[in-house]
Amino acid sequence: TCTFMGERSHDAGGPYRESWSQYAQELESPHLPLLLRTPNGRHATGQNRDRWVLHPGSRSVVHQDMFVFLGKLMGIAVRTRQYMALNIAPLIWDLLVGERVSPDALAGVDQMLRQSMHKIRHIEDEGIGEDMFAYVVMETYTTLSTDDRAVELVPGGAQRDVTFQDRSEYADLVENYRLHEFDVQIVSLRRGLATVLPVQQLCLFTGEELETMVCGRPYIDIDLLESCTEYSSCSADDEHVKFFWEVMREFSHEERSAFLRFTWGRSRLPLNAAGFPQRMKILNFNKNPADQYFPVAHTCFFQCELPQYSTIDIMRAKLRYAIFNCQAIDGDDTGVGMQAAAMGWED
C-alpha cells in the first residue's frame, strides 16, 4: 500500500497507482539528476522534442544507485503492467536492449549536431578548401556533452586544432562520443532490470518493444476505454453519458491522460481489453441542480460519478476543471485516511 502524508487517502489501489504517475513526473523534471530533455527539445528543432535522455554527467556512486533503482522500477512496470509514463528517447531504449546504433540515430536526439558534423565532413561542397578551412572551422578536438560539459575527444584535445585533412576523423570521434556518453548509466539501468527480468533476453526485443512493455502507449484510445466501461444507475443511451463520450473524443492527448489520472490514478491505458484489471464504471450523481456540481472520482475503484449536465458545454467545462484542479486523493473519511492526513515528515 501507499500512504500520502498530509492527504486524506486510504489506499485500495488508487494512491499506489498515483505514486507511479508521480515517479514519472518527478523523473522528467529538474528535481532529479537522472534525465535531461533532448537537445532537440532544448533547441526546438528536429524530432523527439518532448523526449528525455539519461544524464551523462550523473556518474557518482549515489547517482548509479539511483539508476539501478530506476531499472528496478522499469522491471516492476513490465511484470505488473503498471506502466510508467516516461517519454524517453528511442535511442536510449535501443541501447538498453543492446541494439547497435548508428550515427544516424543521433538526429533523433540532437539534429543540430548531426547536421554540423555532416557539413564539416563535406565542407568542400560549400566551396571551402584547405586554404580557407582554418578561418571557417575553428574547432579543437573537444565536444560538448548532452549536459553541456566540454569533453576532450583525445588526450590533449583542447590544444589540438581540427584541420582540413582530419576533419572526418574529428566528426567520427564526436559522433562516437555522443553515442556512448550514456554507457555508464545504461549499465546501471540494466543492473536494476536484471533484478526483476531476465536481462540477457532483452536482445530478443527491439527498443520500441521494451518501451511499450515499460511505458505502455501514450495515446489514450477512447474506443478501447468505452468498450471497457460499465454503468450503474445510468446507461450509455443517457444524454449526459453521450455528452461525456463526445467530450472525451474532443479532448487532446493531455486532457485524456489527465482524466485517466483523475479517475484511476494512472495516465496510460492497458494495451488491450484483456489487460484491464478492472473496468471503468460511470455512476449516476443524484445531487441537484447538477450543473452546479463537479464529477467525483473514486480512483481505487476506477469510478466516476457523473452529474446529469444539461449541455455538452457544461460537461466539457466541468470535466476540464476537475481533471486539472482536483488531482489530490484527499476525500477518504476512514480512520486510515485521517491518520495519513495527520502525518508529517517527522513520521
Image (spheres, grey):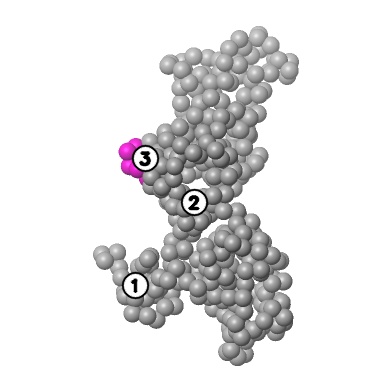
- Secondary element under disc 2, as helix, strand or loop, is helix
Q: Is residue 110 above or below residue 262?
A: above
User: Does 9 sit left or right of 85 as displayed?
Assistant: left
**Residue that label 3 marks:** 64
Residue closer to the observer: 228 or 306: 228
Q: Quadrant of residue 239?
A: bottom right
Quick one: quadrant of the C terminus?
A: bottom left
> Around disc 2, counting alpha carbons within 10 Å, would you say few (fewer than 14), some (14 to 19), or many (20 or more)?
many
Residue 145 is situated, as x and y percent measured from the top left of the image, at: 49, 31
- Secondary element under disc 1, as helix, strand or loop, is helix
CA separation in Å, label 3 and label 2? 21 Å
Residue at 61%, 63% in the rendered image: 273
Segment colored magenta: 60-67
Q: Is residue 262 above or below residue 62?
A: below
**Residue that label 1 marks:** 340
Name the front one of labels 3 and 2: 2
Amino acid type indicated by mark 2: Val
Residue 250 is situated, as x and y percent measured from the top left of the image, at: 71, 66
